[in-house]
Image (cartoon, rainbow, N blue to C red):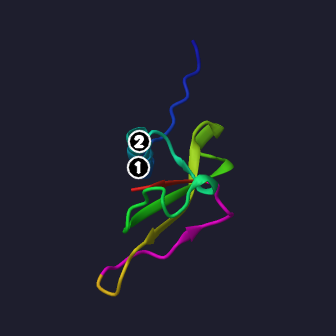
Amino acid sequence: MPVVCIQEVTVRDVDADRFYALLDDLCQQLGGPRQLLACDRFSGWPLRGVYFFFETGEYRREGRDPRVVRVGSHGLNARTQGTPHCGTGWPSTAVAS
């Protein structure tokens, strides 16, 4: 009889998978992720929003999918609340929403 491994799936795993699926949808709508080095002030960035950075060599599970290494916001004022920047390293790819 073959051995079957069952991996426990947590709510966090499901939420993370949904988050990355939404980012994939956004990337498809934008025609792919924007490369930070190729962007300037005329690149069509939104005035306010959230950004996600991916870094070359950083992957999610099993080394297949890129992993978000930094999340931040821009264009906030005193009336809007944002979260502080988080992540490590200096990323190379950004997706803006």
Question: In the image, which disc is placed on residue 21?
Answer: 2
Q: Is residue 23 at least partly visible in the picture? A: yes
CA gap, disc 2 to disc 1?
Answer: 5 Å
Image coordinates for residue 89, horizontal then vertical, percent: 68, 63
Name the residue at 44% across, 43% down: 27
Residue type (three-letter) at the residue carrying disc 1? Phe
Numbered range of the magenta stretch = 80-92
The quadrant the N terminus occupies is top right
As helix, strand or loop, the secondary structure at mark 2 comes to helix
Tell me where residue 24 appears, x and y as whole percent.
44, 41
Task: Indicate which disc residue 19 carries.
Answer: 1
Q: Is residue 54 visible in this depiction of the protein?
A: no
- SS assignment at label 1: helix
**Crowding near pointer 1: few (<14 within 10 Å), some, many (20+)?**
few
The residue positioned 48% from the left and 41% from the top of the image is 8
Near-viewer residue (16 or 12):
16
In the picture shown, does residue 74 fall above or below 32?
below
- Which amino acid type corresponds to the residue marked 2 in the rendered image? Ala
Relative horizontal placement of residue 42, taking residue 15 as reference (left or right):
right
> How many numbered badges does the structure rendering display?
2
Q: Position of residue 39 (x, y in %)?
A: 56, 56
Indicate whether residue 11 is drawn in magenta: no
Q: Are marks 2 and 1 in contact (CB under 8 Å)?
A: yes
Identify the residue shown where x is 59% and y is 42%: 61
